[in-house]
Amino acid sequence: MKKSVRKGAFLLVAAMMLVLAACGGNGGNNGNGGNASAGGNEPTAKTEEASGGEAASGKVKLGFSQVGAESGWRSANTDSIKSSAEEAGFDLKFSDAQQKQENQIKAIRSFIQQKVDVIAFSPVVESGWDTVLKEAKDAGIPVILTDRAVDSQDTSLYKTFIGSDFVEEGRRAGNWLVEQFKGKDGDVNIVELQGTTGSAPAIDRKAGFEEAIKGQANLKIIASQTGDFTRAKGKEVMQAFLKANKDIDVLYAHNDDMALGAIQAIEAAGLKPGQDIIIISIDGVKDGFVAASEGKINFIVECNPLLGPQLMQAVNDVLAGKEIPQRIVTEEGVFTSEDAKKELPNRKY
Ligand code: AHR
């Protein structure tokens, strides 16, 4: 009996020593980062990693579908989105649609599958978004439109639209032209390089410009075609315009890149851009400002691409459950050649 008690005591002490040794070994010096006695923490940490890291680390997941890289404006816009997301500490899932709506729809569906917190996108064209936006809404993921609008009747499909007033941009271009030809007789032949067919800026800039010049019977749009917002297409279409029309007085380009392409075509035809043909464009990117300060572009209506900070603020507000306005309009200016000369050294993009 005594023997078995002694044996029991020995086993108990041995067991306690093993426990103590185990505790001591995990006291922070074994390279495992300590805290092993709190065995319950380990599975949690593994779960965080297994569950995909970013969500578990608390970062806001923002899915952003960009139109493409068609212009200087677009590159500046992409840089603004990326740097602002980084500054805000968001996990940005960025997708380039290469100017194709189908790619944007695919990207949005993939963001839904990845269960991002917010989806933002700049729609390449205005129409055809209802189905995919409804899918995002059903998944409980808020959507923010930036830069370009959609024509969906159901405005509950997105939280807000942050961007320029493109109709007003067109109006500003038209109003300036009306001022230049005030009191002058004779027809003024205008050619127009439109943006991407079906896109909000192409539709609205055309409408605003036409509205502004409609009271002036001598201001005539004699040709209008898409240049897809690119320099190459702007050059190609301007070449065709010059071939088909001997008397072009004014070029109205829906963005700087198309105007810059057109300038190449005008110079190649032996004409002086800004003098033989008055040029009005929209955007105000650095290359546009250079051309304007050289007198090759006469008037630029600004379209601000730096939408990143406003977007990140809106994401935070939406996630915090704050009410935000359905429309956030960007502030922008206009620049003559003289203004452009002064502004050029400050132009960041
Ligand atoms: O949607 C904004 C327009 O898209 C810019 O004016 C143009 O340069 C861009 O490609």
Image (spheres, rainbow, N blue to C red):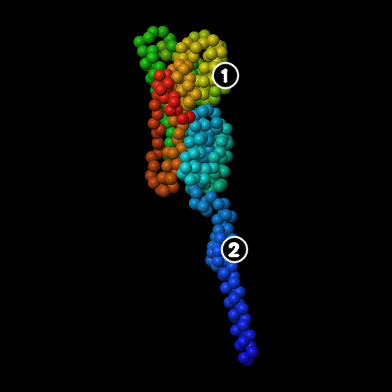
Percent position of residue 232, x then y: 57, 22
Q: CA distance from mark 2 to mark 1?
A: 70 Å
Q: Is residue 261 left or right of residue 335?
A: right
Q: Residues within 10 Å of mark 2 (few under 14, many from 20)?
A: few
Percent position of residue 62, x then y: 50, 44
Question: Which residue, given by chain and number where applicable, does mark 2 sit on?
Answer: 30
Q: Residue at x 39, y 8 (%)?
A: 185
Q: Residues within 10 Å of mark 1 (few under 14, many from 20)?
A: some
Query: Disc 2 or 1, which lies upstream in sequence?
Result: 2
* Disc 2 C-beta below 8 A from ligand 1: no
Task: Identify the image quadrant of the N terminus.
Answer: bottom right
Q: Are marks 2 and 1 in contact (CB under 8 Å)?
A: no
Percent position of residue 69, x then y: 55, 31
Which is in the foreground here, disc 2 or disc 1? 2
In-front residue for pair 155/45:
45
| Amino acid type, label 2 | Asn
Q: Is residue 132 visible?
A: no
Q: Residue at x 41, y 8 (%)?
A: 186
Local SS, label 2: loop
The image quadrant that residue 344 belongs to is top left
Q: Is residue 164 above or below residue 86?
A: above
In-front residue for pair 149/300:
300
The outermost residue toward the front is 29
Question: Which residue, given by chain and number where applicable, does mark 1 sit on?
Answer: 236
| Amino acid type, label 1 | Glu
Q: Is residue 339 visible?
A: yes
